[in-house]
Image (cartoon, rainbow, N blue to C red):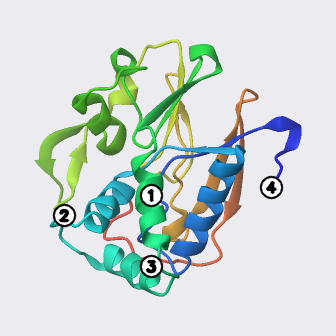
């Protein structure tokens, strides 16, 4: 699979759990990474799936149950390949000689290029205030509002209605699975490209579900 002008696609995680074609998505992303045409930073949903596939005791909610059901229909060895793929991914990537940083939930400037449990957790889950909202979901701390780093940070994790630049950071999760859009950033042009969802694949408990 080729990309125009030698570009690489960068996937920002949460490939699983909320849709009818999880294994198709995994096959596409794994194949592109193997071919050298893509990078993939895992999301919190992939890490939970990895723990389950490795025999850890995790709570199987509806989304994960859907993923496991689809994996069971695959040939022997596919689930193992998926687990190995997730485990081999870096939680964040520093690209373009340090001018671009990508992570599932974003990353503070002081964490760029570092690999500690704290950095990994932030890249996967972001920053929370310790409080819960009316739906019982963690309240996100707005780290991007205080970001002043020179590197552009591109991330997802928390859906937004429209992708907007905030202090050289950009959230590209525009809630495709919830009936929104699938959004990509063309870099270094800083051009946004979006396609509307064909339908609502998953009903959100709120417009900002994790």
- Crowding at mark 1 (Cα within 10 Å: few <14, some 14-19, many 20+): some
Q: Give the distance between the C-alpha atoms of the residues marked 4 and 1, in whole angstroms.
A: 22 Å
Q: Give the distance between the C-alpha atoms of the residues marked 2 and 4, in whole angstroms.
A: 35 Å
Residue in view at x 51 percent, y 54 percent: 161
Q: Give the distance between the C-alpha atoms of the residues marked 1 and 3, in whole angstroms.
A: 16 Å
Q: Earlier in the sequence, mark 1 or mark 3?
A: 1
Q: Earlier in the sequence, mark 2 or mark 4?
A: 4
Query: Mark 2 — residue?
Result: 56
The location of residue 7, given as percent across then percent down, is 78, 38
Q: Give the distance between the C-alpha atoms of the residues marked 1 and 2, in whole angstroms.
A: 19 Å
Q: Quadrant of the N terminus?
A: bottom right
From this viewpoint, is residue 158 visible? no
Query: Mark 3 — residue?
Result: 71
Q: Is residue 57 left or right of residue 12?
A: left
Q: Earlier in the sequence, mark 4 or mark 1?
A: 4
Q: Earlier in the sequence, mark 1 or mark 2?
A: 1
Query: Mark 4 — residue?
Result: 1
> Which label lies toward us, 1 or 3?
3
Q: Give the distance between the C-alpha atoms of the residues marked 3 and 4, in whole angstroms.
A: 24 Å
Q: Nearer the viewer, residue 167 or 25?
A: 25
Residue in view at x 51 percent, y 82 percent: 74
- Crowding at mark 2 (Cα within 10 Å: few <14, some 14-19, many 20+): few
> Which label lies toward us, 1 or 2?
2
Query: Mark 1 — residue?
Result: 14
Residue in view at x 47 percent, y 73 percent: 77
Q: Earlier in the sequence, mark 3 or mark 4?
A: 4
- Decide: marks 2, 4 in contact (CB < 8 A)? no
- Decide: marks 1, 2 in contact (CB < 8 A)? no
The location of residue 126, given as percent across then percent down, is 31, 39
View extreme (front): residue: 77
């Amino acid at each position: 699979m080729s990309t125009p002008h030698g570009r690489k696609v960068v996937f920002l995680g949460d490939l699983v759990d909320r849709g009818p074609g999880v294994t198709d998505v995994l096959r596409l992303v794994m194949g592109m990474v193997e071919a050298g045409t893509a990078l993939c930073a895992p999301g919190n949903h992939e890490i939970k799936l990895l723990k389950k596939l490795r025999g850890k005791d995790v709570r199987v909610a509806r989304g994960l149950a859907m993923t496991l059901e689809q994996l069971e229909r695959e040939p022997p060895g596919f689930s193992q390949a998926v687990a190995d793929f997730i485990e081999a991914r870096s939680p964040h990537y520093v690209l373009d000689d340090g001018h671009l940083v990508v992570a599932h939930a974003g990353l503070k400037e002081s964490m760029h290029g570092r690999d500690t449990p704290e950095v990994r957790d932030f890249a996967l889950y972001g920053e929370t205030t310790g409080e819960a909202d009316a739906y019982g979901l963690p309240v996100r701390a707005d780290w991007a509002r205080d970001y002043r780093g020179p590197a552009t940070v591109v991330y997802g994790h928390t859906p937004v209605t429209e992708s907007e630049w905030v202090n050289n950071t950009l959230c590209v999760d525009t809630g495709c699975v919830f009936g929104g859009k699938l959004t990509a950033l063309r870099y270094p042009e800083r051009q946004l490209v979006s396609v509307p969802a064909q339908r609502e694949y998953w009903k959100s408990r709120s417009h900002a579900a994790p």
